[in-house]
Amino acid sequence: MTVPSKYLIASIFAFLFCFSTIAQEKEKKRKKHSKEIVIDSIIEVKDPINPLSPAKAAFYSAILPGLGQAYNKKYWKIPLVYGAIGTGVYFYVRNNREYNRYRDAYKRRLAGFEDDEFYFSNGVRLTDPRVSTESLERGQKFFRKNKEIALLVTVGLYALNIIDANVDAHLLQYNVDENLSLAPHYKFNELDATSNLGLTLNFKF
């Protein structure tokens, strides 16, 4: 084999090696680009917005306190709802019972009887009652005021339970997409030693 033939064969091998290397690089780039395209083309599918969801949650809480919170899957709020409303009911019942005691005794006194419960202590009749007639009148006003306040608080907590369920249902459908965000920013200028504070609005298509 002559010298030129050796150079020719070596040149052919070098050309094939370079061509193979270039082809491999192109294939790697093609795979990389196709992979990136697949990743970028993923579309996040979100649950459709139900405009009736807040109304349903409020309606359920109006029928039965805590039911709207269960509809919103906020189960941890149910004990809070019943604890708050139960406390209001407890104070209403307690003050109403005391008011009835003082009212009944006061009526008996006005009718001229001296046999109400405040004339007795451990089953023994007292010469003077434990609670005077004037104190019975003041006690009625005190307990009546307290039971009215307890009733208003209970009704307010019941309404708050409905509002909470409605607002929660709205917030569950609120758009918190990272493509749309408003955030504060702080920038320090090293040239004149000043700082800038503002808001940045990001909107990505």
Image (spheres, rainbow, N blue to C red):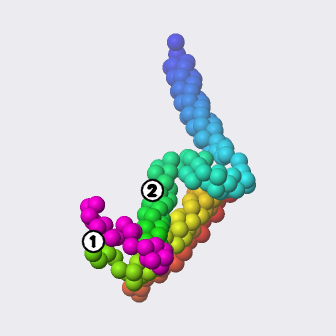
Badge 2, how many Cα within 10 Å: few under 14, some, many 20+? few
Q: Callout 1, which amino acid?
A: Leu
Compared to 10, does 102 lie above or below?
below
Taking the spot 59% from the left edge, 57% from the top edge, the residue there is 165
Q: Position of residue 108 (x, y in %)?
A: 46, 73
Q: Callout 2, which amino acid?
A: Gly
Taking the spot 44% from the left edge, 60% from the top edge, the residue there is 90
Residue in front for this viewpoint, 54 or 156: 156
Q: Is residue 190 visible from the viewing direction of this image? A: no
Compared to 52, does 26 lie above or below?
above
Q: Position of residue 94 (x, y in %)?
A: 43, 63
Q: Quadrant of residue 114?
A: bottom left
Q: Is residue 193 left or right of residue 128?
A: right
Q: Is residue 29 magenta?
A: no
Residue in front for this viewpoint, 81 or 152: 152
Q: Position of residue 196 (x, y in %)?
A: 47, 81
Q: Is residue 74 visible from the viewing direction of this image? A: yes
Q: Which residue is mark 1?
A: 126
Magenta residues, as a range? 107-126
Q: Quadrant of residue 8?
A: top right
Q: Kindly report the distance in space between the C-alpha atoms of the residues bearing marks 1 and 2.
A: 42 Å
- The disc placed on residue 83 is 2
- The disc placed on residue 10 is none
